[in-house]
Amino acid sequence: MQWLVWALPALFIGLAIGAGIGILIYKNSVQSQIRQIEAEARLQLEATRSEQKDLILRATDEALRLRTEAEAQIREARAALAKQEERLQRKEENLDRKIEGLERRERQLQQRERQMEQLHQEAEQLRQQQRAELERISALNQEEARAIILKRVEDETRDEAARRIREIEKNMHEEADKLARKVISMAIQRCASEYVAEVTVSTVALPSEELKGRIIGREGRNIRAFEQLTGVDIIVDDTPEAVTLSCHDPVRREVARLALIKLLKDGRIHPTRIEEVVNKTQQEVDQIMREEGERVAYEANVQGLHPDLIKLLGRLKYRTSYGQNVLQHSLECALLAAHIAAEIGANINVAKTAALLHDIGKAVDHEVQGPHALIGAEIARRLGKSPAIVHAIAAHHNDEEPQTVEAWLVQAVDAISGGRPGARRETLDLYIKRLEALETVATSFSGVQRAFAVQAGREVRVMVQPDAIDDLGSIHLARDVAKKIEESLQYPGQIKVTVIRETRAVDYAR
C-alpha cells in the first residue's frame, strides 16, 4: 500500500506537468496562427494599397486624356466659331454693300422717274398744241377727223379682206381637202389596230368551293386583310368555283388577281402571307409595266426616253379612257404622227415622241391635281424633253394655245385614234372619274392615309393614321366625309363611308 501513497502524488504531478506542457504547446500554436494571419493580412493590405495606387494612376491618366480631348474639342469649337463669325462678318459686309447699291439704284430710279414725268408733261403739252393747230387748219375737231379716217380705212380694208378671203378659201379648200384625205387615209391604213373592251371586274377561278371559306378566313380576317392591302373588293357570291375582284383602278385589280392566284396555288392563306404575296406581286407588276413601256417605245421607234418616262408609259397599260386602252392609244398616235409628219414635212422625231407621251399625265393624274396634258408636259420637261415636245404635249387639249405644226399634229392624231368607230365608250370613263372623285374627297381630310372606292362606287373605305385620329375622331371623320360627298358629288342611291383605324406593332426576333 505504501507504493500507492507515492504513486498517486507522482501521477497527479505528471498530469499537471502534461497539462502545462499541452497548454504551452496550444498557446504556441495559437500564437503561430495569429502571426500567420497577421502576415497574410499585411500581404493583402499591401496588395490592396498597390491596386489602389494603380487605380489612382490609371484614373489620373484617364482624367488627363479626357482633359486633353476636351481642350482639343474646345479649341476646334472655338476655331469653328471664329470661322463662322468671320463668314457672318463677311456676309454682313456684303449685305451692307448690296444695301448701299440698292439705295443708290433707288435714288437713280427716283431721279429717272422725275425726268420721265417731266418729259411726259412736255410731250403732252406738244400734243395738245399740235391737236389745236390741226383742228384750226382742218376746221374739224379730233373726234370728227378720227371717225372720217377710220370709216374710210374700214371700208377699204373690209372690201380688200373679203376679196382675199374668198380667193384664199377657194384655193385652200381645193388643195387642202385633197392633201388631207390623202395623208389621213394613208396614215390610218398603215396603222390598223384591234380594240378590246375594258371592264372593271376580274373573275378568278377556284379549284373547289371550299377555298371560298379559306379566302374569307376566320371571322373574315383574310378577306379584310386582302382588301385593305390591295384596295380591291372581293365579291364572294353564289357563282360556282369563282370569286370576283372589283376595282376601278386596273393596276390594283391586276395586282390583286395575280396575288390571289398565287395564294390559291400556295394554299397558305393568312394575313401575314397575304401581305408578303401582295408586296411581291406589286414588284412583279411594276416589272411588267416597265417592260411594256420599253416595248411600246421600241415599236414606236422613239429612242432616248428617261427610265422614269418608260415606267410611267408602262402604267398606261392598265389605264383606260372612255374604254380605250391608253397605252395602245398612245402607240397608235405615235405611228400616225410619224406617218403624217413624213408626208407634210414636219419634224418626225418631235411629232412621234410628243404623240407617244401626250397622255403620260394620265398615269399620275389621280395623284396630282390639274389637267393631264399640263401634268404630262411638266413631267416631260423635268425629265429632259425638248421645249417643242413639251409644248405639243401641253397643247393637245388646248390647255395651251398650239404654236407649232407638231402641236396641231398631235391634236389631230389624238382625235383620229379616239374617234374611230368602237374605239371609246363614254360610260366607263365617267364611271372611273366618279370613283376617283370619291377617293379625292375622302383623301382631302387631314389625317387620312389612303382611300379606296369599292363596291362599284357604293362604298368608300378610308384608312386613317392612328396617331393623328383617335376612335372618336374616326366617327366624326366618317360623318364629315359623307356630308362632303353629299354636297359635292352626284350619284345614284347611297354611298357607305367606312373609316378604318389600325395600329401595327412590328419587331424582329434575331
Image (tube, rainbow, N blue to C red):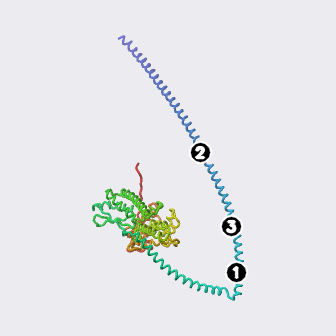
Residue 386 visible in image: yes
| Sequence-first disc among 1 and 2 | 2
Kind of residue indicated by mark 3 = Glu
Q: Which mark is residue 106?
A: 3
50 lies left or right of 111: left
> Is there a contact, CB below 8 Å, between mark 2 and mark 3?
no
Query: Element type at marker 3?
Result: helix
Q: Which of labels 1 and 3 is toward the front? A: 1
Residue nearest the viewer, comparing 162 with 211: 162
Q: Which mark is residue 127?
A: 1
Quadrant of residue 262 within the rendered picture: bottom left
Q: Which of labels 1 and 2 is toward the front? A: 1
| Sequence-first disc among 2 and 3 | 2
Quadrant of residue 356 within the rendered picture: bottom left
423 lies left or right of 213: right
Q: Position of residue 121 (x, y in %)?
A: 71, 77
Quadrant of residue 232 within the rendered picture: bottom left
Query: Element type at marker 2?
Result: helix
In the displayed orientation, state which residue is furthest to the bottom.
139
Name the residue beneath numbered marker 2.
Answer: 70
Cα separation between marks 1 and 3:
31 Å
Q: Which mark is residue 100?
A: none
Kind of residue indicated by mark 1 = Arg
Residue 471 visible in image: no
Q: Position of residue 400 (x, y in %)?
A: 52, 72
Mark 2 surroundings: few (<14), some (14-19) or many (≥20) residues within 10 A: few
Q: Position of residue 345 (x, y in %)?
A: 49, 70
Mark 1 surroundings: few (<14), some (14-19) or many (≥20) residues within 10 A: few
Query: Element type at marker 1?
Result: helix
Q: Is residue 346 above or below residue 213?
A: below
